[in-house]
């Protein structure tokens, strides 16, 4: 067992965690315009709205974006414009569509689709506890469930953001890694490889996940006599397939603009590259979607990734400051405007302390406190690399993924929408920290028990 346990206490904990998951079934995240990108080919608009994109300044426009969560959506009458880039989110959209059809609902209900996702994630997190802590899963799994139950995470399961898929696939990925490393073989290797690919395809910024995982496995297990060589080879193989996501990115112009004006030029404004015109300097810190001033339309043709890289080459300190800026902004996952959560006909989320405990704790530990939060799981994982290389592999991967997300987000789109871009990086760091904490407590418990046995023997 992981710890000495009390049956009644465990039952109470499980009932509390399960109740909190049920309580938030009516919680979602407001649309920022990305819903149209992810599912606009199938779903037209929220129920009750007269047009797909309300005119600027209209009352409908004020209610459509950034303010309220709309749980019911109208289907398009004719699905003609199929998505040009298929992502893993479309699997969950399809499952949600099937759930709505089986329920006989006339509209697409985010509550119905979210219920299926919640059940799936609940079972996955129980599996994570069992794989990594054996009989101690009764203690470990509620911790994972409690963290994912924070409304800043679970609200995305009642949304049409691509993070919906990623929040489910990341725990499934570490579950598949644990199974593959504990039971080396074709079936589990295939499961881990497919899961890594699906996660990499859930959103463009996760595209390097298979290669990152392969590098961690190579570091921990070596290559010569390692039994995981086939898994490493498979991961590198699917990495080539995962490259199609960034290559087919239709929003590259927005990304490169933000990477320059809200990134390379923004993080260190003491030095500008010589080619930067005086008129352009007024756009530093102005995101691509800003209408006043409308810098994107004026300069998008003059900004490519070449200018972004040249700016960092001219002032490499900006890249260092950017990474520090991103790391210090980890642990900030609370959904403040421009995103909003709303619970209809139940109770205001702001009054429910238990569903926001984790995001509040993380908020206190932001800034420079993020650095020891990154070092802690690394130290614990590396110390147990010989006794438990599986734990080491998973924790190192999760921390490496977090740092990769800081780099991709900061260097790829600067400070724009950084809190949302770092959501999965935050989740990975949370999972790594909890696993490391449980390992540390298990070691302390084992040493304490051995000490007690020694005293009794004397």
Image (spheres, rainbow, N blue to C red):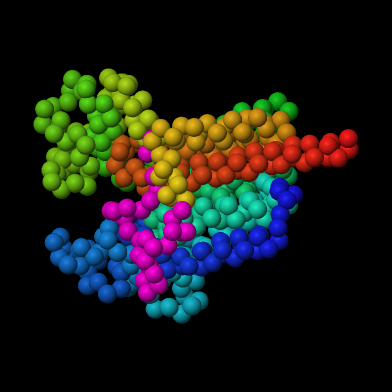
Up-down relation of residue 202 to residue 448 (above or below): below
Residue name at image x 11 percent, y 27 percent: 278
In this rendering, would 331 be left or right of 433? left
Residue 47 colored in magenta in the image: no
Up-down relation of residue 36 to residue 100 (above or below): above
Q: Quadrant of the C terminus?
A: top right
Residue 342 colored in magenta in the image: yes
Dominant secondary structure (helix, strand or loop) of the stretch shown in magenta: loop
- In-front residue for pair 299/83: 299
Q: Residue furthest right?
A: 457
Quadrant of the rendered image containing residue 138: bottom right
Residue 441 in sight: yes
Q: Which residues are magenta?
A: 328-357
In this rendering, would 264 be left or right of 212? left
Residue name at image x 10 percent, y 31 percent: 279
Residue 438: give x, y in percent of width and height: 63, 43
Residue 274: give x, y in percent of width and height: 18, 20
- In-front residue for pair 65/382: 382
Residue 80: give x, y in percent of width and height: 33, 65
């Amino acid at each position: 067992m992981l710890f000495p346990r009390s049956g009644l206490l465990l039952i109470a904990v499980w009932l509390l965690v399960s109740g909190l998951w049920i309580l938030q079934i009516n919680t979602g995240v407001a649309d920022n315009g990305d819903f149209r990108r992810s599912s606009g080919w199938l779903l037209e608009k929220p129920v009750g709205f007269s047009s797909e994109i309300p005119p600027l300044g209209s009352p409908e426009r004020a209610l459509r974006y950034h303010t309220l969560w709309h749980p019911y959506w109208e289907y398009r009458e004719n699905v003609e414009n199929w998505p040009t880039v298929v992502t893993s989110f479309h699997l969950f959209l399809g499952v949600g569509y099937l759930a709505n059809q089986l329920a006989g609902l006339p509209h697409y209900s985010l509550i119905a689709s979210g219920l299926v996702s919640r059940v799936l994630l609940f079972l996955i997190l129980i599996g994570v506890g069992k794989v990594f802590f054996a009989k101690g899963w009764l203690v470990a799994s509620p911790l994972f469930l409690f963290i994912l139950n924070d409304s800043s995470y679970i609200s995305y399961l009642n949304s049409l953001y691509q993070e919906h898929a990623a929040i489910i696939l990341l725990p499934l990925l570490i579950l598949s890694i644990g199974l593959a490393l504990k039971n080396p073989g074709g079936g589990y290797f295939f499961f881990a490889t497919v899961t890594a690919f699906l996660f990499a395809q859930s959103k463009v910024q996760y595209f390097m996940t298979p290669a990152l995982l392969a590098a961690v496995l190579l570091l921990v297990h070596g290559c010569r006599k390692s039994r995981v060589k086939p898994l490493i080879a498979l991961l590198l193989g699917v990495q080539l397939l995962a490259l199609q996501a960034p290559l087919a990115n239709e929003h590259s112009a927005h990304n490169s603009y933000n990477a320059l004006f809200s990134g390379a030029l923004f993080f260190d404004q003491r030095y500008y590259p010589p080619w930067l015109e005086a008129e352009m300097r007024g756009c530093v810190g102005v995101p691509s979607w800003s209408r006043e001033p409308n810098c994107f339309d004026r300069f998008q043709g003059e900004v490519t990734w070449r200018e972004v890289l040249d700016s960092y080459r001219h002032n490499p300190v900006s890249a260092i400051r950017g990474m520090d800026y991103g790391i210090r902004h980890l642990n900030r996952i609370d959904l403040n405007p421009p995103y909003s959560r709303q619970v209809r006909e139940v109770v205001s989320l702001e009054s429910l302390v238990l569903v926001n405990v984790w995001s509040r704790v993380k908020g206190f530990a932001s800034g420079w406190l993020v650095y020891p939060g990154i070092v802690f799981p690394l130290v614990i994982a590396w110390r147990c690399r010989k006794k438990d290389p599986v734990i080491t592999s998973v924790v190192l991967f999760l921390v490496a993924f977090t740092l990769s997300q800081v780099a991709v987000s900061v260097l790829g789109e600067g400070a724009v929408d950084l809190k949302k871009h770092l959501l999965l990086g935050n989740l990975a760091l949370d999972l790594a920290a909890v696993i490391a904490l449980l390992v540390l407590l298990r070691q302390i418990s084992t040493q304490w028990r051995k000490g007690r046995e020694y005293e009794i023997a004397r």
